Amino acid sequence: MWSHEPRASSTLSSTESWLRLRNFYTCLKYMMFCFNTIIFVSGGILLGLGIWIRYGGILFSKILGSYAVHFLNIGYFCIVVGLMLTVLGFLGCLGAMKESRFLLLMFIMTMMAIFIAKIAAAVLALAFTQMVEGILREKGPKSLKEYYVDNVKDDAVSGSWNSVMQRLKCCGFNNYTDFSNSVFVNKTGLLYPKACCTTPDSSVCEA
């Protein structure tokens, strides 16, 4: 009689291999879904940042003057990249769950394009770092002197400076002397605003 045990063993081994491959593929699919979800959320955040920069143009123009156009261009760049990442993340998630080869191929091609764009953006950021630092050093103290008027709720420039000084626990751009001969000093007679103090609401904080 012929024994069927080797054939049964071979069939069992093939079944186990297929199950392992299927489990691996399922795990890979969900990992890809999670990865693309992160890309989708990151794109949404970058898109929101770009819109905020774009519609904060009035604030930037007061602080940075003629240099504000460079920051508005950064806003447009963030909007474009944010949209690309959002669409990419959506296509990746959809392709992973639907197991669509076409969508996954689009995802891979878009990933390559964005990777190249990120390299270009990194090179540009490195090239413009010193320029941005120079702009801030030139325009930062000037905006304090000309536009800062203390705790005014409807004044975007003053509100932004108050937030920065309170969070960073600093006073002015370099130090409190940045307020010398400023609109704030001429208006209030104080040497520096309460935002410079550790507890701005304290009555002890008097310049």
Image: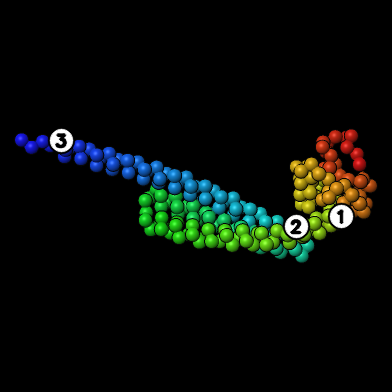
> Please, which residue is most extreme toward the left here?
1
Q: State the residue at coordinates (53%, 55%).
A: 85
Q: Is residue 25 visible?
A: yes
Q: State the residue at coordinates (91%, 41%).
A: 207
Mark earlier in primary sequence (1, 3): 3
Position of 176 with respect to 23 (left or right) is: right
Front position in the image: 68 or 188:
68
Tag 1's secondary structure? helix
Which mark identifies residue 176? Answer: none
Foreground disc of the pair 1, 3: 3
Q: State the residue at coordinates (86%, 54%).
A: 145
Find disc 1 in the rendering and name its residue.
145
Foreground disc of the pair 3, 2: 3
Q: Amino acid at mark 3?
A: Glu
Find disc 2 in the rendering and name its residue.
133
Badge 3 density bin: few <14, some 14–19, many ≥20, Cα 10 Å:
few
Q: CA distance from mark 1 to mark 3?
A: 91 Å
Q: CA distance from mark 3 to mark 2?
A: 77 Å
Mark earlier in primary sequence (2, 1): 2
Badge 1 density bin: few <14, some 14–19, many ≥20, Cα 10 Å:
some
Q: Is residue 58 visible?
A: no
Q: Amino acid at mark 1?
A: Lys
Q: Quadrant of the N terminus?
A: top left
Badge 2 density bin: few <14, some 14–19, many ≥20, Cα 10 Å:
few
Find disc 3 in the rendering and name its residue.
5
Q: CA distance from mark 2 to mark 1?
A: 19 Å
